[in-house]
Image (cartoon, rainbow, N blue to C red):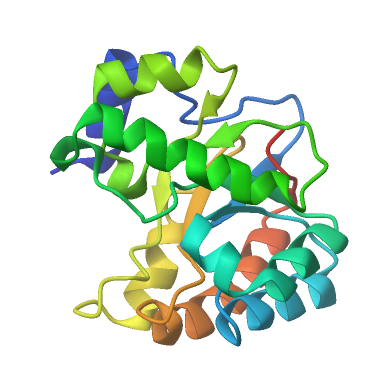
């Protein structure tokens, strides 16, 4: 399957979702899903700090509740935050009322600490129904998808393949997905530092989603 053609078709079908962020410069957008997780998220933050770049973290509410200090560090170091539901729900398999309540529960957890007035949401697995999306968009949220998926969570692929997925598909405006999760840890530790270095060498600049 040609991912570029497939992605263009999907993004055409769902134009209200953000798939890329066109810009006049050479900006790209690193994003991390499923944290905050001690050790993994903290390692990511160390890498980002050393490289002097900012990213956007789509956080699970339950993890924020369990690890508030890691969440505070994300904010304190100038990164952007997004809602990823409280329990990492699959919208296609969840009653819409329950899904929206779970989204709101994460929103409330984020608001306990986050003073940013940025409303970003990423549906776990990228799966959300039209009704669920409409409800969230009506709350003035942007639904942030992606055009570059590292597949770091897939334990069947090699760390090198994970890196290649990013390097070979990134272009100006790309939204790149990594995961600061235990499942992705091995591929992430290999691919993220190398991806950052190689993308910098190609002249890309990193920015947060707003």
Name which residue lies at 62% across and 77% down: 193
Q: Is residue 48 left or right of residue 173?
A: right
Q: Position of residue 63 (x, y in %)?
A: 52, 67
Question: In front: 191, or 69?
Answer: 69
On screen, residue 120 above or below 156: above
Q: Is residue 88 left or right of residue 67?
A: left
Quadrant occupied by the N terminus: top left
On screen, residue 113 above or below 143: below
Name which residue lies at 72% across and 39% down: 26
Q: Can residue 166 be spotted in the picture?
A: yes
Q: Is residue 143 left or right of residue 94?
A: right
**Count of picture labels:** 0
Q: Can residue 33 be spotted in the picture?
A: no
Q: Is residue 210 left or right of residue 186?
A: right
Residue 39's quadrant in the figure? bottom right
Q: Position of residue 160 (x, y in %)?
A: 38, 79
On screen, residue 199 above or below 173: below
On screen, residue 67 above or below 201: below
Name which residue lies at 57% across and 24% down: 141
């Amino acid at each position: 399957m040609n991912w570029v053609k497939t992605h263009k078709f999907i993004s055409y079908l769902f134009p209200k979702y953000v798939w890329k962020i066109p810009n006049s410069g050479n900006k790209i957008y690193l994003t991390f899903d499923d944290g905050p997780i001690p050790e993994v998220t903290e390692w990511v933050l160390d890498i980002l700090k050393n490289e002097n770049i900012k990213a956007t973290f789509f956080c699970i509410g339950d993890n924020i509740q369990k690890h508030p200090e890691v969440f505070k560090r994300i904010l304190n170091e100038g990164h952007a935050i997004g809602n990823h539901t409280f329990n990492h729900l699959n919208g296609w398999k969840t009653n819409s009322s329950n899904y929206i309540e779970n989204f709101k529960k994460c929103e409330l957890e984020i608001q306990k600490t986050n003073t940013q007035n940025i409303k970003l949401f990423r549906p776990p697995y990228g799966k959300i129904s039209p009704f669920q999306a409409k409800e969230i968009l009506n709350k003035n949220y942007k639904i942030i998808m992606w055009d570059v998926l590292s597949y770091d969570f897939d334990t069947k692929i090699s760390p090198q393949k994970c890196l290649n997925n990013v390097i070979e598909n990134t272009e100006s405006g790309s939204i790149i997905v990594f995961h600061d999760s235990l499942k992705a840890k091995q591929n992430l530790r290999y691919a993220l530092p190398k991806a950052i270095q190689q993308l910098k060498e190609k002249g890309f600049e990193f920015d947060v989603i707003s």
